Image (cartoon, rainbow, N blue to C red):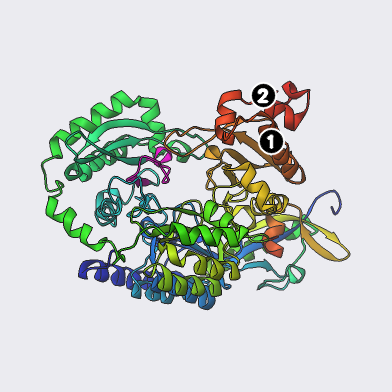
Amino acid sequence: MYNGRPMRMIIANRLNDGRVVFYKAGGGWDIDIAAGAVIEVEAEEAGLFAAAKADEAGCKVVDPQLIDVQVDGGKPRPVAIREAIRAFGPTI
Amino acid sequence: MYRYDEFDRKLVIERANQFERQVKRRLSGELNEDQFRPLRLMNGLYLQLHAYMLRINVPYGTLSSRQLRCFAHVARRYDRGFGHFTTRQNIQYNWIKLEETPALLHELAAVEITGIQSSGNCVRNITSDQYAGCAKDELADPRKYCELLRQYSVLHPEFSYLPRKFKIAVTGSPKDRAAVAVHDIGLRMHRNEQGEIGFEVLVGGGLGRTPWIAHTIRKWIEPEHILSYIESILRVYNLHGRRDNIHKARIKIIVNQMGIDKYRELVEAEWQRIKDSALKVPAEEIERIDRYFAPPAYAKLGDATELLGRQRKASREFDRWLDANTVEHKVPGYRIVNLTLKALGKPPGDIDADTMDAVADLADRYSFGEIRISHRQNLCFVDVRQDQLHELWQALDALGLASPNLDSITDIICCPGLDYCALANARSIPVAMDIRKRFVDVDELADIGELKINISGCMNACGHHHVGHIGILGVDKRNEEFFQLTLGGSSDQNASLGDRLGPGLPQSAVPDAIAAIVERYKSLRSEGERFLDTYRRVGIEPFREAVYGKDSEKAVA
């Protein structure tokens, strides 16, 4: 939580290979969650998500979504089990 | 085995070319995801949690060694070295790249395999008895009818946009190994007093969030009329099926809302109109297709009773495997061999590329180069000489494919669950693996006997949990995974839906709950009585108490 609201990241699947990717602070996408932008300030969220949606329209990614994350020891981790599995891979 | 004719070949190659162009248009932005999704789904390509998933049809579960080697190649070249066999007798790859899919489909087309209609609101892969053509109790080989239905339903223009997906299964044996009663249409073969073959037609079965056992819509239909009768069922469904609500769109909803008598009336009226149309199948056409399924060149053998007796005496392990994993064949001197894909530490139904190649080699050596996939996510060699069983068992054992656990508590049906599937609510594979780990003593497996566990990671029920003797359904409660148990389900000729045992359990509690159910069963069973029969005799309460304790009444609250 940051100032009473959950921190967020933007997750999507890359169009050409389906890999799970995270939107980076400076634009672009990375398969490593640690490289993704953690959005702490609500005011930044809309702009970053709009940029991510533009990448969807530009055929870079499919279905970008905002997800809640927690940051422990500087490492972000999705709150929902589903998104954690997407971020870190199958558990078996 | 069926081999493609010129029409099949042309169709499959044209379809791969077409999809190649569609992928190019998607990657270039000419198509957006909403436009592209139905096109990729019609070729079996999903976008799952981690990557694209490709589902490939294995028509009625029959595969050649050449095709299995191609699957191994696909696993290595396009995936992460493994594949997953499903309850529709298909194979799925979990790590596919969209940009590589056209090349992959061309490679499959070269061995007469496709993903056409393995997804989407159309007639899916026709499934059947994995022992088709070989089972001792079989009336006739159901595969010729499956193939007829495959040819009829692939790219059928009228049925490419049904209200929802549509699944058909066919059994030629009174012992139903194809789960026909939980299909949209099930065909159950019978023989009449004149010795002729015909089908009982079941309709409106299915699992998912609203499970139903199918109704018999017609007790007898001659083979020449199966296409027209199925077309009549599909037409009534296409007309009356709901397209406004995905959860109410399957035929089972319409049949059960309308009532089977009314549905039958509509179907019969349509059928009277079309039964003598071009859909009437000439006997020569059935015979033509049947020739593709001519029996292999069996040697003239007697049963190897004496040899097997000696081999059994010499090896307790072989003896156990022979009892558990092999089945009587209709031809003397042969036996059907099951290879369960339920090894310790492996996800049910998964198989790696090297093992696929090794299985293909063994099929060539011991079973006329043919492999079958069962809806229980196992493989079979259906034509093994009895005098080669010991040799084959040793080879399978070396591959880790000789666990004597067919239809046992560790022969678990399991969907991919939340580890892979975008629809899932909970992880099913770790639950299956935990149960597998709990029951490692093969003598205990033999003592427990037939006890089928089916696990689904969500209510869509890809793991058929409603018809497991013990069913396990994963649910999400405020971001925690829980598992609801059902007891008494069955997909055989006496199909039934399981009864809910009580509130969901955390994953860590599931193996103990299963062990408690097993112990209670052991204390209640009569001599030789299967778990399912004990359950049907005593009801749910003793098992509820075994899992939830004396206060078990609270468990159902």
Labelled pair 1, 2 in contact (Cβ < 8 Å): no
Is residue B506 at least partly visible in the picture?
A: yes
- The chain that hosts pointer 2 is B
Residue A41 image position (x, y, % from top left): 79, 58
Residue, x 46% and y 51% (percent of image)?
B375
**Residue B95 located left or right of residue B440:** left
Residue B550 image position (x, y, % from top left): 78, 23
Q: Nearer the viewer, residue A83 or B113?
A: B113
In the rendered structure, which amino acid carries the disc numbered 1?
Answer: Ile
Circle number at residue B517: 1
Quadrant into which the N terminus of chain B falls:
bottom left
Task: Report the number of discs.
Answer: 2
Residue B123 image position (x, y, % from top left): 34, 50
Pointer 1 and pointer 2 on the same chain:
yes
Q: Which residues are magenta?
A: B168-184
Quadrant into which the C terminus of chain B falls:
top right
Q: CA distance from mark 1 to mark 2?
A: 11 Å
Q: Nearer the viewer, residue B320 or B314?
A: B314
- The chain that hosts pointer 1 is B
In the rendered structure, which amino acid carries the disc numbered 2?
Answer: Glu
Q: Secondary structure at mark 2?
A: helix
Residue, x 41% and y 38% (percent of image)?
B249
Residue B173 lies in the magenta stretch: yes
Q: Residues within 10 Å of mark 2 (few under 14, many from 20)?
A: few
Q: Quadrant of residue B197?
A: top left
In the image, residue B178 sits, relative to residue B233, either above or below, namely below
Residue, x 25% and y 57% (percent of image)?
B151
Q: Quadrant of residue A20?
A: bottom right
Q: Secondary structure at mark 1?
A: helix
Q: Which residue is mark 2?
A: B541
In the image, residue A38 sits, relative to residue B425, either above or below, namely below
